[in-house]
Amino acid sequence: MEFLNLTHHFLIAMPAMVDPYFNRALIYVCEHNPQGALGVIVNRPLDLTLARLFEKVELELHTQEIGALPVHFGGPVQMDRGFVLHRPCGEWQSSMHVTNEIGLTSSKDILVSISSSGEPKDIIMMLGYAGWGAGQLEAEVGQNAWLTVPASTEVLFGLPPESRLATAMQMLGVSFSQLSDTAGHA
């Protein structure tokens, strides 16, 4: 069976997903290879702003606009660690280039840059991530736990968190109310 690479795709949790971490989640897949997958939930803002987070890490934000952005719950793995999904990629100490345009960074140097210059401007800050072992994500997709659709930078960086899931579903031509919580096979 040929490997299906879901890097730079959205995973949309099916209605039967009862796991509270992933129920109604929209996940952006940052890396997917034969060893496993890593993604971040992009529609779960926490009751925490960037301004408050930057206070906690003793960095001063020089722009109110960025400070008002929410910090997201990125997933149940390493929930005490911060990750920044951003555009453009740039060069940071601990970054993963997802595409030529989008990166995921976990080093403090990106926070220092955001603090001092407001760059990169397109960011989603999160605590934690979602991870899958070898073959696990493929098995879950095969069991109808997730719908997949190629990701859109407009959905990621141009929409508020509460609109991202519905818009990603519209990209598939369906709405959540059209989905069944039971899987069928012909």
Image (spheres, rainbow, N blue to C red):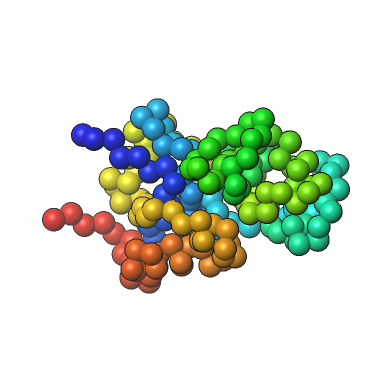
Q: Position of residue 186 (x, y in %)?
A: 13, 56
Q: Position of residue 153 (x, y in %)?
A: 51, 56
Q: Is residue 62 above or below residue 77?
A: below
Residue at image position (44%, 54%) is 151
Residue at image position (71%, 49%) is 119
Residue at image position (30%, 40%) is 4
Q: Position of residue 22 (x, y in %)?
A: 48, 51
Residue at image position (21%, 57%) is 184
Going by the image, does 54 lie left or right of 119?
A: right
In which quadrant of the rendered view does residue 159 lie?
Answer: bottom right
Q: Is residue 5 above or below residue 157?
A: above
Residue at the limit of the structure toward the top, as seen here? 35
Going by the image, does 166 lie left or right of 86?
A: left
In which quadrant of the rendered view does residue 90 lie?
Answer: top right
Q: Quadrant of the N terminus?
A: top left
Q: Position of residue 126 (x, y in %)?
A: 64, 47
* Camera-side residue of 119 and 147: 119
* Camera-side residue of 23 and 74: 74
